[in-house]
Every structure is written in C-alpha cells, then in structure tokens.
Amino acid sequence: MATQKETMDVLLAECFKELACRQPIEKITIKSITDKAGVIRPTFYNHFQDKYELLEWIVRVQVIGPTKPLIFAGMIDEALTLIFRAVRDEREFYEKAARLEGQNSFSEIINKCVKDLLLELIQSKGPNRKKANPWLTTEHIAQYYAQSMCFVVINWIKGGMTVEPEEIRDIYNYMITHSMSQVLEELWDDT
C-alpha cells in the first residue's frame, strides 16, 4: 500500500506530465503544478526542490525503478525493453521532455539516473576484482554505459520512436557489443 508521501509524489508527477504535454517544460511553474494537483505550493516543496527534481523522480521511479529487479537478476534485455516501452507508452510527455536542453537537460537527468543505477549494481556485486587497467574504475564504466544508453534513448525519442522497443534494444545491444572497427567493417563490407 502506498504511503501518503508516495501518493502525493505520484499526483504531482501526473499533473506535471499533463502540463508538459500542453506546454514547454521550461514554462511550467510550480504554481501551475500545485493548482492542477489541488494542493498548496509548500506541499510541492515538501516533496521536491523544483520541477527538474520532479522530472528526475519520474525517470528514476516510474521508468527505471520497475527495471531494477530485472537488472539485478541479470535480465538486461528485458529491462531495456521495459524502459523503451515505458517511454513509448507516454510518448507525448517524453517527446516534450527530450526537448529540454541546457542546465537540467533531460539528457543530463537520464544520464544521472542510469549512472546511479549502474553504480548501485556494480557495488552490489561486492568489492572490485582484478581490473584490466587502473583507468577502468566503476565510475568510468557506469558513466560510459549511462552515456551510451542516454544517447540511444534521446535519439530514439527525437526520431519519433519509429523503431519498436525490442528493435531499439537490439540496436543498442549491437552497438555496445561491437567495436568501432567491427561496425565500420560491416558497414562497408561488399559481400
């Protein structure tokens, strides 16, 4: 059963998403969110610092959160598919969110959420084992995969999500498991 805080978080998130479908996120005010939710402004600030923290909560809790059990169970493909489906299911909102640039950009928010998840996963596996190179820190590894995932998600959204979730998952897996040399060789292979 959801707590009162969780219920309010969801209400504020849903109101924010509805508003974002009608106007640019940059123009949404805290007052417009609280008016739509039927609460007073201090209620918002008891839950979130600003609308960008609310947007991060949406990504972290509503998109990435449901994938955590799959990721921790090693079911990465299923988790990726779930992420792409969640975004596609709220297509209009994420198309607007993907336009958010500059400080507090959507790209920055996704990157942070994915990186945090990957760091949590890596740290849950216990202390670092032997590294191939001292530069390969858990921080660098998490950042690399977060940035690559963010690139695919943002470009998929901005491209109109014309590729099905399973197909974009497979494209991501292809890109991440092949070296640049292999990909270039396959692109120009005449046979």
Image (tube, grey):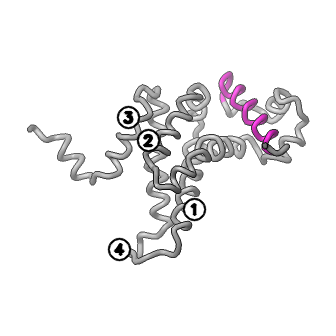
Residue marked by disc 2: 152
For the residue pair 14 and 99, the one nearer the viewer reads as 14
Residue marked by disc 1: 120
The amino acid type, in three-letter code, at marker 3 is Glu
Q: Can residue 79 be seen in this snapshot?
A: yes
Q: Which corner quadrant of the image does residue 52 belong to?
A: top right
Q: Counting residues from the N terminus, which is met first, the one under dot 2 or under dot 3?
A: 2
Q: Was residue 47 drawn as part of the magenta stretch in this picture?
A: no
The amino acid type, in three-letter code, at marker 2 is Val
Instruction: Name the spot of residue 87 as percent of width and height, x first.
Output: 55, 34
For the residue pair 105 and 92, the one nearer the viewer reads as 92
Q: Which corner quadrant of the image does residue 24 belong to?
A: top right
Q: How many numbered tags mark residues here?
A: 4
SS category of the residue bearing label 3: helix
Q: Which mark is residue 167?
A: 3
Q: In screen coordinates, is 128 left or right of 187? A: right
Label 4 Cα neighbours within 10 Å, binned few <14 / some 14-19 / many ≥20: few
Q: Counting residues from the N terminus, which is met first, the one under dot 4 or under dot 3?
A: 4
Question: Depth-wise, is mark 1 or mark 2 nearer the camera?
Answer: 1
Q: In screen coordinates, is 121 left or right of 23? A: left
- In the image, the segment drawn in magenta is 5-24
Residue depicted at 56% across the width and 35% down the height: 86
Residue marked by disc 4: 132
The amino acid type, in three-letter code, at marker 4 is Ala
SS category of the residue bearing label 4: loop
Question: Depth-wise, is mark 4 or mark 1 nearer the camera?
Answer: 1
User: What is the distance, in whole Å, between disc 2 and disc 4 at their CAs?
Assistant: 27 Å
